[in-house]
Amino acid sequence: MGSESENFNILVVEDNPSDFYLIEQMLLSSRINTKNIYSADRLSEAKEILQQHPIGLVLLDLSLPDSHGISTFLEIRPYAQKIPVIILTGLTDSEMAFEALKQNAQDYLVKGEFDVNLLAKSVEYSIERKKVEEKTLASEEKYRQMFYKNPFPMWINEMDSLKILEVNDAAIQKYGCTGMKETIFYNLH
């Protein structure tokens, strides 16, 4: 995996010193090559670290003195948009786990239920998933640019109803439409 060959900085956001120590020891004894392990015991401190240092991974506790629950992840997400975030929590709430994953967390681990190998695997897989996600987003953006800036009129139809979902700039200019995209091509042959 990529993390075996490259050193990167990890931010552990954890307010319990004992839990931080255990996580740090797991990271140091794992196959993951870390450059630095940063620690924050509050969400506000984590945001500052993310702005000041090149962080490659965030391990985030959801229960902090200044934030609690899924809102902790939602608040840090804008500061870690291109960084994989793994949720570490003492809660075994599967609904919260599912919500965190839906909101783009890379993984969700319950404290006390993972060992060094599972943590290393989660870190490696999270980093690789985030790389794939970034490539996919870049590809989608290229497609959007090719579609909207194409000099030829183009549109996208819904398969069953043939309803127009999207049109590009050239189609709007050629057919003179300034209204709703769905009505542009009903009168075309």
Image (cartoon, helix red, strand yellow):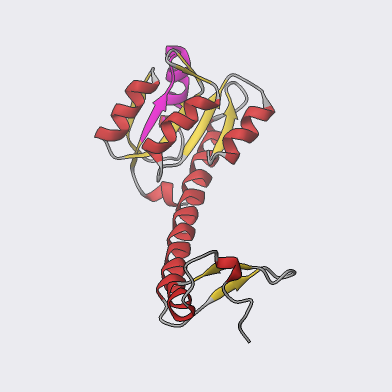
Question: For the image shown, how many numbered marks are present on the structure?
Answer: 0
Q: At 40% from the left edge and 81% from the top edge, which residue is drawn?
A: 151
- Of residues 31 and 141, the one drawn nearer to the viewer in this rendering: 141
Q: Is residue 42 above or below residue 57?
A: above
Q: For the C terminus, which image quadrant?
A: bottom right
The outermost residue toward the left is 52
Q: Position of residue 160 (x, y in %)?
A: 75, 69
Q: Position of residue 25 (x, y in %)?
A: 43, 24
Q: How would you classify the magenta stretch by its main secondary structure?
A: helix
- Of residues 50 and 30, the one drawn nearer to the viewer in this rendering: 50
Q: At 42% from the left edge and 47% from the top edge, which residue is drawn?
A: 4
Q: At 68% from the left edge and 29% from the top edge, which residue is drawn?
A: 95
Q: Position of residue 143 (x, y in %)?
A: 47, 69
- Of residues 77 and 4, the one drawn nearer to the viewer in this rendering: 77
Task: Give the magenta range.
Answer: 10-27
Magenta run includes residue 167: no
Q: Position of residue 15 (x, y in %)?
A: 43, 15
The outermost residue toward the right is 160
For residue 147, side relative to residue 112 (left or right): left
Q: At 32% from the left edge and 33% from the top edge, which residue is drawn?
A: 50
Residue 113 figure quarter? top right
